[in-house]
Amino acid sequence: MAMPTQATYVVIGAGIHGLSTAWHLAEDLEAKGLGSGADVLVLDKTSIGAGASGIACGVVRNNYFQPAMRELMAQCVEVWESDPKAFSYHPVGYMQISPEGMHEDVGTIYEQQRAIGYESVFIEGADDSAAYMRGIFDDWRAGGITSVLHEKKGGYANNTAALYGLAGKAEAKGVRIMTGVTVTGFKRDHSGGAVTAVETDKGAIACEQVVVAVGPWVAKFWDMLELPKTVNIKGPEGQILADVPMWRYWCLEEGVLGVDPDFQKTNSGGMPPVIHVDCDQPLISDVDGSVITEEMWGIYYKPDFHFNGVQGGAMPYKVERPVDEVAIDPYGPESPEFIVDDDFAHMWCSALAFCQKRFSGQIGKFRKEPSGGLGCFTPDSFPVFDRFCDNVYIIADSNHGYKMIGVGKLVAEELLNGKSRLLEPFRLSRYAEGKLHPTSHSPFPWS
Ligand SMILES: Cc1cc2nc3c(=O)[nH]c(=O)nc-3n(C[C@H](O)[C@H](O)[C@H](O)COP(=O)(O)OP(=O)(O)OC[C@H]3O[C@@H](n4cnc5c(N)ncnc54)[C@H](O)[C@@H]3O)c2cc1C
């Protein structure tokens, strides 16, 4: 394909957000008689799925303590459900299994799921929780659990397969997807405001609107657009936390236990929901009986034929270095630094064995291949979806956004001058205005 010199809409990044935006934009332009997919150009420096979307576990859940996240996730699940085959989506459901310290938080999630019509079951008390879990897996044995939230919707999608499904839908509407093109900067108008062209290593592309959906690379684009490196955050009592860095990296840790995926079937022989366990009991090594941690810990897992095993992860860790000193490239499994190590395997496999007897003694089957990757987090670890420099829409999310396939639909609506109530709580101005999302007792920074 010849390198274009002009496109009305340039979408940067061929991950879940860029591809979903491009597809929905093409559909909306056509439906409104304003143009077509031929007006939309997607650029990616490497390939479809070269970023976080291509390595994500692919879990799709509604379970968020923040009301705005839950409403948004319910909309995203509708998009997943609109074409499960094309998106390689498995609607097996999702379970949040929690200790007493999270009981109340999860109870409010359940109440609000009922309020928005999102089907779930809430089990309370240690005995009832254990009985419910043993009704699904007869070897369930996790201690310290006092509630189970079982979301009947959601589940997981096969990471790259879903992206190719999205790319196919976008291309069918006339969208051009060009890979191997690196965006290097932006040309701005005389006042230093709107972007007039996207500069790439293959030449400049004049444009009217830009969508930046570059996952963990967002801090680099933030700099290219000369946006502020810090924000002031207004706290609940009106106090100002000044000059908080806009970005920081966390490393997400995931891996695969190389057993037959059928190993994790339910008592009735079916495919189980995605399991997420948070726990406040000491985690004891399944290898040598040592104490791995006495802090609160959490894991998630699911049988997955795409990964050919039981795949999942644990809490991420914070990368303490300043953002500018963190090497994002090479990304994911190619990174020499941000991949899981033996400590992760030990912790995750021991936690699996803590939950279900069948996993005891299985650590030797942990796949010793590079996995995991960086996420670039905002100050509150929730996404920013907002317009900058007049005509640049930034979709800033790389830590829990694979499931957010519906965000592109809402962004497309906003690009065509609509306003999305669901995206409103995710503007950058929330920090200065003190309109913060509530925080939960989960050991994960994004729940
Ligand atoms: C290990 C891991 C597991 C995860 N698991 C889950 C999960 O189970 N569920 C969930 O909901 N979320 C999960 N996430 C988070 C989720 O993957 C991300 O939030 C989401 O994929 C971000 O999508 P994106 O489209 O914004 O970015 P990405 O998928 O990262 O895509 C960005 C693209 O931009 C391209 N790009 C970067 N710089 C340039 C440039 N200069 N020029 C051109 N192109 C460029 C890259 O090549 C890349 O393809 C996980 C993340 C990680 C790292």
Image: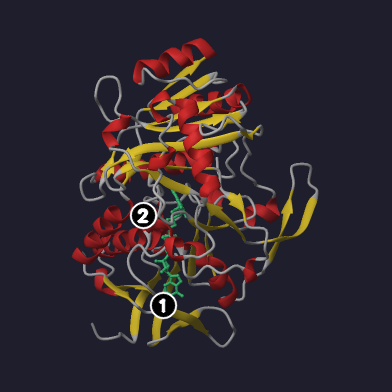
Q: Nearer the viewer, residue 364 or 150?
A: 364
Badge 2 is on which residue?
A: 409
* SS state under label 1: strand
Sort mark 2 into few (<14), some (14-19) or many (20+) by Cα contacts within 10 Å.
many
- Residue 208, numbered circle: 1
Residue at 25%, 47% in the rendered image: 88
Q: Quadrant of the N terminus?
A: bottom left
Whether residue 311 is visible: no
Examine the image and state in which quarter residue 175 appears: bottom left
Rounded to the nearest whole Å, what is the CA distance between mark 1 and mark 2? Answer: 19 Å
* Label tally: 2
Q: Which amino acid is tagged 2?
A: Lys
Residue 56 place in picture, x, y as percent: 41, 52
Q: Which amino acid is tagged 1?
A: Glu
Compared to residue 181, the image places residue 398 above or below, namely above
Whether residue 406 is visible: yes
Closest to the camera, between mark 1 and mark 2, is 2
Residue at disc 2, CB closer than 8 Å to ligand 1: no
Is 271 on the left-hand or right-hand side of 18? left
Examine the image and state in which quarter residue 211 appears: bottom left
Is 61 on the left-hand or right-hand side of 80? right
Residue 349 place in picture, x, y as percent: 47, 37
Q: Nearer the viewer, residue 373 or 239?
A: 373
Residue 344 place in picture, x, y as percent: 52, 45
Sort mark 1 into few (<14), some (14-19) or many (20+) by Cα contacts within 10 Å.
some
Q: Quadrant of the C terminus?
A: top right
Residue at disc 1, CB closer than 8 Å to ligand 1: no
